[in-house]
Structure formats: structure tokens, C-alpha cells
Image: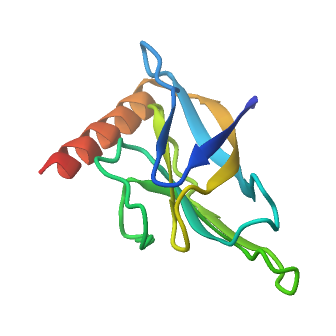
Amino acid sequence: MPIKSFRGLIAEGAQDTISLHTNNGSTGYRIKKFQLMPNSPGAKTNNGVVKIYSVLQGTIPTSGATIDFSDQTLLAAGYYEDNASTAYTAMSTIVFDNVTFNQDIYVTYTDNDSSSIFINYYIELEQIKLDLIENTVATLKDIRNIEAQNV
């Protein structure tokens, strides 16, 4: 299957939209790779969390990032830690779900140490042709998640 890649630079407290929706919803995607890299390696202290959601997030915290794997709209989470001091080694932990989706996804970034920090992200998605039943299931799941979030 074809792989689509997306990359971006996101500000702390921001949300990026990756447009994936189609008119008929017959194209699905699965995350195959998710990587993080600061835009100023070793220059600033980072203690950040980048998350990928299946639904638009109403607010993005500017500090105090939390990760909740029981959130059914959370597709992936990445934690990146770097220190301005060369005595410390940068560290990254990435976890993503093997779920198939066919709608837009949303990338958020929160840094626990300071504001005005940016981080680069790189995402590879496997493109999957969905039959009518898979298409319906993926679309209904997204609609249910959106409705649950608005309650």
C-alpha cells in the first residue's frame, strides 16, 4: 500500500489539521511512523508532548500535558525530552494505535517546561482502500467520537 508522509513545525499550545477526508470516505489510513525533533536541538529545554487525535480538540493546554490512553480519540502520543545542557541526552517515546481512520486528524503540542517552544513532527500513514462496510464503520466511529466529545 502507498505511504503518505506529513511533516510540520508546531508551536507549543497549538493544533495542526492534517486533511485526509474524501467525498466518499473509501480511503483509510493507519499510522506507520511518528517522530519528533526540536527546531533548536540542545538550545532549549524541552519537555513536550505531541498527540494525534481523530477529532478536533477544543482547547490545547499550554502547560501540564497529560496522556490518557483510555481516550478513544487519541491515535498517537509522543513524549520528547531535551535539555539545553550537553550533560543530558535527548529522549523520545512514541506510542501509536493500529486503528484505521478515514477522516482528518489533529496534531497538538504541549510543553511542560516553557512556552514559545516549537517542535517538528513527521508522520507516515499507510493508505488503505476501504470497502463499503469498512468505510461505514470508520465513518460511524468518527461521528460517535465527535458526538461524545461534544457532550
Q: Residue furthest top?
A: 23
Locate residue 111, reporting x and y percent: 54, 66
**Left or right of 3 in this view: 51:** left
Please say if 80 is above or below 89: above
Tell me where residue 42 sits by quadrant.
Answer: bottom right
**Colour theme:** rainbow
- Where residue 63 appears, x then y in whole percent? 43, 68
Measured as percent of width and height from the top left, residue 40 is found at: 78, 56
Locate the N terminus by quadrant: top right
Q: Nearer the viewer, residue 61 or 50?
A: 61
Q: Is residue 151 left or right of residue 87?
A: left
- Name the spot of residue 38 as percent of width and height, x first: 73, 57
Q: Quadrant of residue 96?
A: bottom right
Left or right position of 116 against 13 = right
* Residue farthest bottom in this picture: 87
The number of numbered badges drawn on the structure is 0
Q: Is residue 106 above or below residue 18?
A: below
- Which corner quadrant of the image does residue 69 belong to? bottom left
Classify 87 as above or below 139. below
Residue at 34 percent across and 47 percent down: it is 57
